[in-house]
Amino acid sequence: MGKRVQFRRVFWLAMLLAIAFAGLGYRLVDIQVLRHEKLSAEAVKNTRRSFLFEPRRGDILDVKGNQLATSQFVKTVFADPSLIGDRQADVAKAIAQSCRCPRQKFAVCLSLKRARTPRARF
């Protein structure tokens, strides 16, 4: 009679483990297969962000506390004239409008035929 009780306990324990593993397997299939697209998009949204931190550099002072140099925030515009082609005036106008700077400044930079990419700082 003792062996029969032991076998019954082992049977129910095995059934409980089988049900637990079946539930775990269903959960894995649900996450990995059925809801893959939604969870993948949510994971990308939670993990991939771009932040632009522009540090303010400190002023450079001499021994007496006079300011020698300071930081200024500037925007840098890079352009490749080989990709722009003959539309340099239109591109200079568009950049000038968005940056609120004179168009001639960008037109001069874009018309330069240099080996490296021209850039303008303002």
Image (tube, rainbow, N blue to C red):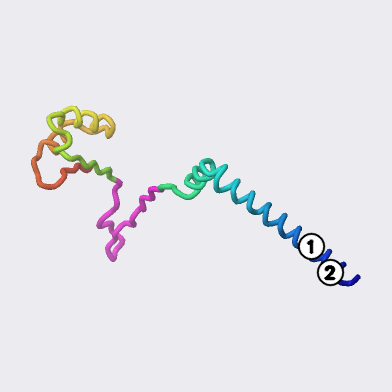
Q: Magenta stretch? A: 51-73
**Mark 2 vs 1, N-terminal side:** 2
Q: How far is the residue under mark 2 from the one under mark 1? A: 8 Å
Number of other residues with Cα within 10 Å of mark 2, as a class: few under 14, some 14 to 19, many 20 or more: few
Q: Residue at x 29, y 52 (%)?
A: 71
Q: Nearer the viewer, residue 21 or 96?
A: 21
Q: Quadrant of residue 87?
A: top left
Q: Which mark is residue 11?
A: 1
Q: Quadrant of the C terminus?
A: top left
Instruction: Based on the picture, tell me whether residue 58 belongs to the magenta stretch.
Output: yes
Q: Quadrant of the N terminus?
A: bottom right
Q: Amino acid at mark 2?
A: Gln
Q: Which mark is residue 6?
A: 2
Element type at mark 1: helix
Q: Residue at x 68, y 53 (%)?
A: 22
Q: Nearer the viewer, residue 46 or 97?
A: 46
Instruction: Based on the picture, tell me whether residue 81 belongs to the magenta stretch.
Output: no
